[in-house]
Image: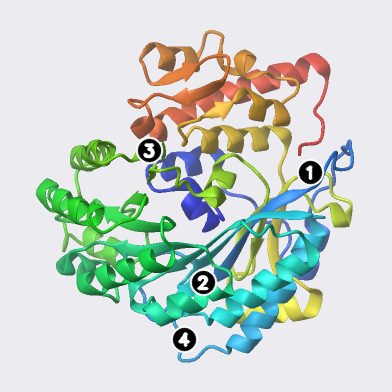
Amino acid sequence: MAVRGLRAALGAMAVRGLRAALGAVRPRGTGCAAGLRSASKPSEPGPEPAGPVTAALYVHWPYCRKHCSYCSFNKYVVPAVDEAAVRACLVRETQTLLRLGHVQSVTSVFFGGGTPSLAAPHTIAAVLEAAAEVAHLPAGAEVTLEANPSSADPARLAGFRAAGVNRLSLGVQSLDDAELRLLGREHTAAEARAAAEAARKLFPGRVSLDLIFGLPGQSREAWARGLEAALGLCDDHLALYQLTLERGTALEAQVRRGVLPEPPEDLLADLYLSARATLAAAGFHQYEVSNFARKGARSTHNLSYWRAEQYVGVGPGAHGRFVPWGEGGRLREARVQTPHPDTWMREVRSCGHGTRRRAALSPLELLQEVLALGLRTDEGVTQQRWGLFSPRLSLEAAFGASGEARELQERGWLRLNGRALRCTPAGLPLLDSLLPALLCQLRRRWNAVEEEDGGGRGSR
């Protein structure tokens, strides 16, 4: 979440509502030098860390072999990659940012992209070693690598396992060759099956398959067949993403021009609900809007996003959320690294990191993220977690009295009890529509508390 790390964190079902509700992080300065000067200083500094500082680590590999027709992520297709140079910069930025955040323990690592399975295993090992030199990386910490079937042959996967990867996220997307061609994927259905089988042998119980639904022209029957095929192939984790037609992509342009049909909303809802029922019957538990697991195979790293825990984003275009204690910061910051790899590398060589944009999150902005991300999960926003970020406004005070949240509870879409605020199974698919009202109520209640006691305090 980490934000390509927020691709995982936001997912497809609620991303439009969350963008509208939270808005974009406004840049304050550009380039590493300007970025270092641009973060706002809290008017009332908070305390030093009360205990050991922990964070997840997201590492972005920005290169792909081709452009997929639907993808709007920060990726680059180039004739050749100077991997030694990229590796050196990933290593340096990893250590710089972990030190900047005074991170003492790394809870999990996620290599995303782009196509990180195109990187050499030596590069993955070097980043993990760099993190372990400046922070504790527990022996059993989850280390996930995203892989495309076309770069996931058994020998390569064995190299990643030897480098320290212990979980694989395989971008299958579809097991139908016609759908794969529509998506512009490089692999075939047969290659996807072979890659999944090889991955399960090398990472037993720790392989996740990504699937995309809601393709132009996709029928209920075609989606059901694809899902059944995936169930016969998968391990214990599946991620189902509704196709988002992102402006600037080839697929969106085809739909906009009328070359391809735009899937109707009622069909998209049917595809999603039917998939939930199919996976439940196969023993999978839905623990997040787009993620399903059985036998406890949840993604530790992605849970850190949804629980609003700290994470450090490394690599071109990576996002992060952490407190820069090393600069005297006391507020958590939303940070974005320079997107273009060549510019990013110049900045890393110059000042140790390539942070392009940063903005200190106010206590209210942080609570908005806690709410919007936590409601994506089956556990919801727990009373305990809310209290960490909001000692003055309880979950009950924010959402228990009359207002939008009470109406949503009466409709059976939301549930608030002594443990948490969470969506019901019926409400979870509607989260996109529920969030704006909830965020509005939160803002109103927060402002009332602010007026009563005359100001806020630093956020974690």
Question: Going by the image, does 186 lie left or right of 22?
Answer: left
Marker disc for residue 394: none
- In this rendering, the label closer to the viewer, 3 or 4: 3
Crowd band around label 1 with a 10 angstrom C-alpha radius: few (<14), some (14–19), many (20+)? many
Q: What SS does tag 3 mark?
A: strand
Task: Say which label, 2 or 1, has the lower sequence index.
Answer: 2
Q: Which residue is mark 3?
A: 286
Residue drawn 61% across and 14% down? Answer: 396
The CA distance from mark 3 to mark 4 is 38 Å
Rendered image quadrant of residue 46: top right
Quarter holding the C terminus is: top right
Q: Amino acid at mark 1?
A: Leu
Q: What SS does tag 4 mark?
A: loop
Residue 248 makes an appearance in the image:
no
Question: Going by the image, does 172 lie left or right of 142?
Answer: left
Q: Amino acid at mark 4?
A: Val
Q: Which residue is mark 4?
A: 78
User: Residue 91 appears at what percent x and percent y?
Assistant: 70, 75
Confirm or deny contact between disc 1 and disc 3 (CB under 8 A).
no
Residue 453 makes an appearance in the image:
yes
Confirm or deny contact between disc 3 and disc 2 (CB under 8 A).
no
Task: Say which label, 1 or 3, has the lower sequence index.
Answer: 3
Task: Say which label, 3 or 4, has the lower sequence index.
Answer: 4
The CA distance from mark 4 to mark 2 is 27 Å
Q: Which residue is mark 1?
A: 331
Residue drawn 76% across and 37% down? Answer: 459
Question: Going by the image, does 438 lie left or right of 16?
Answer: right
Confirm or deny contact between disc 1 and disc 4 (CB under 8 A).
no
- In this rendering, the label closer to the viewer, 1 or 3: 3
**Residue 294 vertical position relative to residue 363 in the rendered view, above or below:** below
Q: Which residue is mark 2?
A: 161
